[in-house]
Image (cartoon, rainbow, N blue to C red):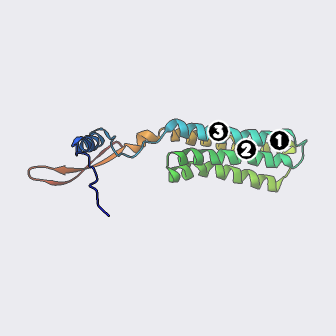
Amino acid sequence: MSHLPVPTRPRRNGGRAAQVLAAALAVFFTPNARAETPDPAAAFFTGALVFVGGFTAGGLLLATSGGSTQDNLGWLVMEGGFALAPLASHAVVGEWTRGIAFAAVPAAMTGGSAVLFNVDPGTIVHGSLPEQRVLWGLFGAGLFSSAVGVVDAAFARDRANSLIVAPSVGAEHLGLQLAGTL
């Protein structure tokens, strides 16, 4: 068996040049690797959706109850939506602790309404004037504080850049420089 020489193609340096060019383009035109800034519009609309969704679901329960204890459930669903809205909106921007803080007031108002319903299950329709005032006061405080929490999440971008830590190197000093807004 005879071995015939295998024909080879002449090598060209064009492949190597293309690789070097591709690597240079990747280095010089790749975007900076920075953390994404929070999206305030997504946070606001998420919170608003939860807010309106809870209000709608609770309102439907109230409207279809016919004066039964389903009224109490509908009322608590509405106030529960108030408690979840700031938590959901702050979760979108990654501010869980702040979301819990803003959800605390509406959650406490929901708890107050639940206690009131435990004392008098007919508070919504047949409650006395003082019971009605307490019930509507709890409802209004929960609604207002929830709305404030949802709007607060829309300002997350401003808080994301409020503290900057950077290395500081000079002729006679080496350290960290802190900058930001209070």
Whichever of callouts 3 and 1 sits on the residue coming sooner in the sequence is: 3
**Tag 1 secondary structure:** helix
Q: Count the numbered circles shown.
A: 3
Q: Position of residue 130 (x, y in %)?
A: 78, 44
Distance between the alpha carbons at the discs numbered 2 and 3: 13 Å
Residue marked by disc 2: 78
Q: Amino acid at mark 1?
A: Leu
Residue 22 image-quadrant placement: top left
- Pointers 3 and 1 in contact (C-beta within 8 Å): no
Residue marked by disc 3: 49
Q: Nearer the viewer, residue 28 or 10?
A: 10
**Tag 2 secondary structure:** helix
**Which mark identifies residue 62?**
1
Direction from residue 54 to residue 26 in the image, left or right = left
Q: Amino acid at mark 3?
A: Leu
Q: Position of residue 159 (x, y in %)?
A: 42, 43
Whichever of callouts 2 and 3 sits on the residue coming sooner in the sequence is: 3
Residue 134 image-quadrant placement: top right
Placement of 174 over or under 151, stated as above or below:
below
**Tag 3 secondary structure:** helix
